[in-house]
Image (cartoon, helix red, strand yellow):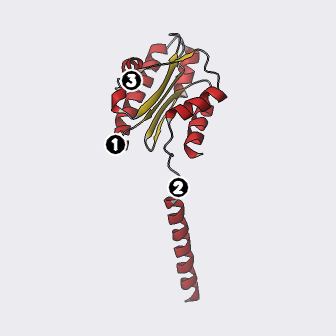
């Protein structure tokens, strides 16, 4: 009888602990993309890249800037580079699937474009990060994609 009671108490405590972790799990904080841009410019050399506007995002991803709260987009300044940074802050999280799909499509197109002759570019594209969290969706292609990823995630958490 005591074993059953002890097992029940321990089960309740474990369940309560898991509930507390779930309730206090951090979601991305609401941060202006200009703040993330500032961190990127301080931490990384983005030589060979330039800030891009609405038309370039539309041409590359098929996304309309007016559909979103804001975005941050850096593209390569030459056609032989594949480094790209796109962070979209959604108006509504229900937009995430469409934006992720557009980003995956862009990634697949770039892989096809560089297949067979751009081995360095293909390697970067194969390690690209496309992900969403909360109201943000990201497309990252870089020699330091893991660092970029960590920077974005850190900015959301601090």
Q: Residue at label 3?
A: 61
Classify 147 as above or below 8: above
Give the x, y percent position of residue 79: 50, 10
Quarter of the image that includes the N terminus: bottom right
Classify 124 as above or below 81: below
Q: Residue at label 2?
A: 25
Tell me if mark 3 has few (under 14), some (14-19) or many (20+) residues whose alpha carbon lies within 10 angstroms of its own.
some
Q: Quadrant of residue 90?
A: top left
Residue 118 can be seen, yes or no: yes
Classify 60 as above or below 7: above
Marks 1/3: CA distance? Answer: 18 Å
Determine contact: label 1, label 2, CB under 8 Å.
no
Q: Residue at x 54, y 20 (%)?
A: 83
Q: Which mark is residue 94?
A: 1
Q: Is label 1 in a helix, a strand or a loop? A: helix
Q: Which of marks 1 and 3 is nearer the N terminus?
A: 3
Give the x, y percent position of residue 11: 53, 74
Marks 1/2: CA distance? Answer: 20 Å
Instruction: Judge left or right: residue 65 versus residue 31.
Output: left
Q: Which residue is drawn at 59% across and 30% down?
A: 38
Marks 3/2: CA distance? Answer: 32 Å
Q: Which of 35 and 85 is in front in this view?
A: 35
Tell me if mark 2 has few (under 14), some (14-19) or many (20+) residues whose alpha carbon lies within 10 angstroms of its own.
few
Residue 145 can be seen, yes or no: no
Q: Is label 2 in a helix, a strand or a loop? A: loop
Give the x, y percent position of residue 40: 60, 29
């Amino acid at each position: 009888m005591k074993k059953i009671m002890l097992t029940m108490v321990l089960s309740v405590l474990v369940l309560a602990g898991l509930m507390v972790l779930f309730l206090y799990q951090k979601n991305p904080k609401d941060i202006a993309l200009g703040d993330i841009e500032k961190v990127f410019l301080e931490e990384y050399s983005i030589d060979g890249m330039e800030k891009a506007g609405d038309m370039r995002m539309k041409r590359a991803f098929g996304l309309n800037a007016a559909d979103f709260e804001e975005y941050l987009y850096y593209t390569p300044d030459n056609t032989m580079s594949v480094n790209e940074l796109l962070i979209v802050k959604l108006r509504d999280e229900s937009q995430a699937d469409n934006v992720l799909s557009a980003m995956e499509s862009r990634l697949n197109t770039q892989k096809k474009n560089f297949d067979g002759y751009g081995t360095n570019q293909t390697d970067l594209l194969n390690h690209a990060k496309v992900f969403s969290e909360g109201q943000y969706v990201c497309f990252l292609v870089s020699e330091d994609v893991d660092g970029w990823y960590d920077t974005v995630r850190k900015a959301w958490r601090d």
